[in-house]
Image (cartoon, rainbow, N blue to C red):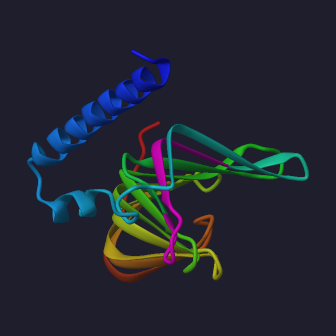
């Protein structure tokens, strides 16, 4: 055999093997094409996926905020958003870098264009300086207005009393809050 004929034969052999495997893959697919297209669409595949997230924000060299989460996924499309499907914890620090307030939740989502963030599932907001704690099932945060709000049932625990109600608005640090509908306030006597 000449070397030219041998090279053509090898190319045809490799090409026919490749065609055979591609045909076998196409015809052995169990999903219909619409399912394959849906699974591979840009909407279902995140642009960024990170595990064990730890993001720190500083101003003038001082820590002001720290976000930790087991997982973060981000979709950069027309309605860009970032999800924290396995929960999140955000700690805000004061001017001497001591924890001032914190929020934890089972799920979080941040909408870039709307400048809003939502937290759902066992939401706990703590103000360490005032020794106050808010428990609810969901809250929304508007970054432009720097306001936190919920329409859900809430429980606010303060030194000496517990307040139950529905709906609340607050500043972003949970320093000044207003309950929309107070249902009960219970005085708590602490044993010393």
Q: Image quarter for residue 10?
A: top left
**Residue 106 among those drawn in magenta:** no
Residue pictured at 59% horizontal, 76% vertical: 115
Q: Residue furthest top?
A: 1
Residue pictured at 18% horizontal, 44% vertical: 23
Vertical position of residue 131 compared to residue 186: above or below? above
Q: Position of residue 105 (x, y in %)?
A: 40, 53
- Can residue 14 be seen from the camera position used here? yes
- Can residue 185 be seen from the camera position used here? no
**Residue 75 among those drawn in magenta:** yes
Vertical position of residue 170 compared to residue 57: above or below? below
Q: Is residue 75 left or right of residue 137?
A: right
Residue pictured at 46% horizontal, 72% vertical: 140
Q: Position of residue 91 (x, y in %)?
A: 61, 49
Judge by depth and name the residue closer to the eye, 111 or 78: 78
**Numbered marks: total:** 0
Q: Is residue 29 left or right of residue 133?
A: left
Judge by depth and name the residue closer to the eye, 102 or 83: 83
Q: Quadrant of the N terminus?
A: top left
Q: Is residue 147 left or right of residue 104?
A: right
Q: Residue furthest right?
A: 60
Please report the bounds of the magenta region as a residue range. Answer: 66-81
Q: Residue furthest front?
A: 2
Residue pictured at 34% horizontal, 63% vertical: 41
Q: Position of residue 90 (x, y in %)?
A: 57, 50
């Amino acid at each position: 055999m000449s070397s030219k004929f041998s090279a053509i034969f090898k190319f045809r052999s490799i090409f026919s093997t490749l065609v055979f495997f591609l045909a076998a893959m196409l015809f052995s697919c169990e999903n219909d094409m619409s399912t394959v297209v849906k699974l591979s669409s840009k909407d279902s595949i995140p642009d960024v996926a990170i595990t064990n997230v730890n993001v720190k924000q500083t101003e003038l060299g001082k820590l002001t905020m720290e976000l930790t989460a087991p997982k973060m996924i981000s979709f950069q499309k027309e309605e860009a958003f970032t999800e924290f499907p396995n929960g999140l914890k955000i700690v805000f620090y004061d001017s001497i870098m001591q924890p001032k307030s914190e929020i934890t939740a089972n799920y979080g989502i941040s909408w870039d264009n709307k400048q809003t963030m939502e937290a759902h599932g066992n939401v706990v907001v703590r103000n360490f300086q005032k020794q106050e704690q808010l428990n609810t099932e969901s809250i929304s945060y508007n970054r432009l207005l720097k306001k936190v709000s919920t329409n859900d049932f809430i429980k606010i625990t303060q030194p000496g009393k517990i307040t139950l109600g529905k709906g609340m608005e607050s500043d972003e640090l949970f320093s000044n809050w207003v309950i929309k509908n107070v249902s009960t306030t219970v005085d708590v006597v602490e044993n010393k």
